[in-house]
Image (cartoon, rainbow, N blue to C red):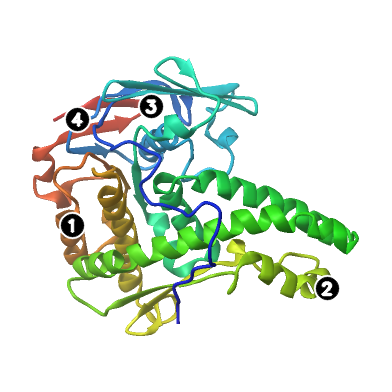
Amino acid sequence: MGTHFSAGPIARKPTLGTGSRRISGMLRVLRLRDFRPFLDAVFDPVAGDNFIVGPNAQGKTSILEAACLLLRLQSPRAAALGECVRFGTPGFAIDGRWDDRHLHLKFEGRLKRFSLDSKEQVAAVEYLSVARVAWISNGDLDLVTGPGSARRRYLDFSGVQLVAGYLKSLRSYERALRSRNALLRDGRPRREVEAFDGPLSTAGDFLLNARARLCEELAPLAEASSRSISGGGEPLGFGYLPGARTGMSAALSAAMEEDIRLRTTTVGPHRDEVTLTLSGRSAATYASEGQQRSTALGLKLAQADHIAQTSGSPPLYLIDDVFGELDPVRRNNLLAALPAGAQKLITATSLDWADGLHRNGALFQIEGGGLRRVA
């Protein structure tokens, strides 16, 4: 069973919602240059629902990816930003406006630059405080059926947006872990390995505490959301299994002989897991595909609800082609679960199933590298 864990007192207790101003507003314009299939495309979304419709492989998902990348400096699809560059060009640029704030991101070679209101940013803290994002896609099924890394990324996506100091601690932990593992692989002396235990413990304790609190707050939201999508169904269990059952310093010391033997660090947040059960049984093993999709959607809706509750206003919903994979009941339940006051960018190959839903928003057609509003 999953447990909620606190690693004890740490120097910087993670606090949800601190370090950022109240978020409000909407994405008013998005311009893509040499991004994925687009030479130069401009998208002017409206408040509320924005439906982007067109055949597969035309760039619908790329528009949503660009919005996420611009607002969060993180692609939900690409492991490296070089994958986003249009073929035959040296880099890409994305511009956008969130209310009256102008955001600009440029990537060329291996260099990423970003600016806020025409002022280039050295650190990302102020830039990332402008807007919040919720990403929902077919790939979310990995949250239920995929490896633990998918569920850790889910927690990190929330933590980076909501917990002051989370991104800094995550990057510090990753750097220390890489260095410690390199020494272990090379069979270096124990004292050299232990030199990284301090920074690994400081950042690791922060992440363990932050993730435990995130899970505690997400659990009831995920249970309620998954029920709303499935129309009732079995209760969802959402638990946290920390990668260190005590504070990091004690856990690293206790695991040192095993780490030396296996030549890798065996305890810490990189071993965290989130358990998902339906009526007490593993959702990955025993649930039907429909139940698994309801669970994944419930997790993502819970994440969006949590962002809204913590930051004070709903995030920008980026919903990529999920409706075609749902049966009519779950499709309608998902639509009903989306907050009316939130701005949403929604992609689909067709809206034949939507019964005029787009009449309450804007409808855009994409084809042949072009994007135009048709309703």
Left or right: 164 as drawn, with respect to 375: right
Query: Which tag, 3 or 2, sits closer to the chain's start?
Result: 2
Query: Which tag, 1 or 3, sits closer to the chain's start?
Result: 1
- The residue under label 4 is which amino acid type? Val
Query: Which tag, 1 or 2, sits closer to the chain's start?
Result: 2
**Residue that label 4 marks:** 46
**Residue that label 1 marks:** 337
Q: Quadrant of residue 362?
A: top left
Residues at circles 1 and 2 in contact by the CB criterion of under 8 Å: no
Q: Measuring 57% from the left and 48% from the top, which residue is drawn there?
A: 169
**Residue that label 3 marks:** 369
Q: CA distance from mark 1 to mark 4?
A: 20 Å
The kind of secondary structure element at disc 1 is helix
Q: CA distance from mark 3 to mark 4?
A: 21 Å
Q: Measuring 20% from the left and 27% from the top, which residue is drawn there?
A: 373
- Please identify, in this view, whether the residue under mark 3 or under mark 4 is nearer the observer: 4
Q: CA distance from mark 1 to mark 3?
A: 32 Å
Q: Measuring 17% from the left and 28% from the top, which residue is drawn there?
A: 374
Count how many numbered circles sit on residues in the image. Answer: 4
- Residue 210 pos. (x, y %): 47, 58
The kind of secondary structure element at disc 2 is helix
- The residue under label 1 is which amino acid type? Ala
- Please identify, in this view, whether the residue under mark 3 or under mark 2 is nearer the observer: 2
